[in-house]
Amino acid sequence: DAGVIQSPRHEVTEMGQEVTLRCKPISGHNSLFWYRQTMMRGLELLIYFNNNVPIDDSGMPEDRFSAKMPNASFSTLKIQPSEPRDSAVYFCASSYSNQPQHFGDGTRLSIL
Amino acid sequence: AQSVTQLGSHVSVSEGALVLLRCNYSSSVPPYLFWYVQYPNQGLQLLLKYTTGATLVKGINGFEAEFKKSETSFHLTKPSAHMSDAAEYFCAVSDTGANSKLTFGKGITLSVRP
């Protein structure tokens, strides 16, 4: 079991640039979640998909954030344009049926 | 709406001592409850879960938690702390199933003194 794979592990970029975070869920899992972790706000759910369809995106902070899941084995979270306050660790998690979520190791994003 | 309260941000115990990490939740329906552990620079790993049935739940690494509906609590315990238990611990609640939206507490950092 390869686990949830996120890339890149670290990203440093300048304010205003586009940032794309990638996630490969565990094979066979049909739900995918994007979380953001910061010291101030803790772990927050941004969006989640079920069978590749977005179910709840109420946690997406603003229009600069977008997420897609074109197929069952790949999802992206895009920030355009990026701002320093977007600096955080972004986690992807996946699950199947009524089983608990499995988390990736995260992408540590720094916006200068 | 559901919420999780983890009082305090840091707990320090001696090696071999009891570990007790507190979690209180709020949910309008019977909750699904979870404890996750996060080691530095890693993702969250499931320690244990409560869905239905037995209220005392055993997890990995010797941890257990008890669901107390009357107290809306799901405290995490371990009889004897080990140095390797030093990490951040998160309590989470879901009201619609284990694979749906999770609401996390702020997390508690556990330190273990030699």
Image (tube, rainbow, N blue to C red):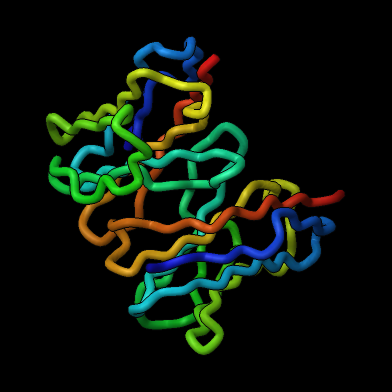
Residue A14 visible, this angle: yes
Where residue B11 sits, quadrant-wise, is bottom right
Which of the two residues, B51 or A77, is positioned nearer the viewer here? A77
Q: Position of residue A11 (x, y in %)?
A: 47, 16
| Residue in view at x 51 percent, y 69 percent | B58
Q: Is residue B108 above or below residue A75?
A: below
Where residue A63 sits, quadrant-wise, is top left
Which of the two residues, B53 or B75, is positioned nearer the viewer here? B75
| Residue in view at x 36 percent, y 73 percent | B51
- Quadrant where the N terminus of chain A lies? top left
Q: Position of residue B38 (x, y in %)?
A: 56, 45
Q: Position of residue A84 (x, y in %)?
A: 52, 22
- Quadrant where the C terminus of chain A lies? top right
| Residue in view at x 27 percent, y 36 percent | A25
Q: Is residue B39 left or right of residue A27?
A: right
Residue B49 visible, this angle: no
Q: Is residue A2 left or right of residue A88?
A: left
Q: Is residue B100 above or below residue B58?
A: above
| Residue in view at x 18 percent, y 44 percent | A54
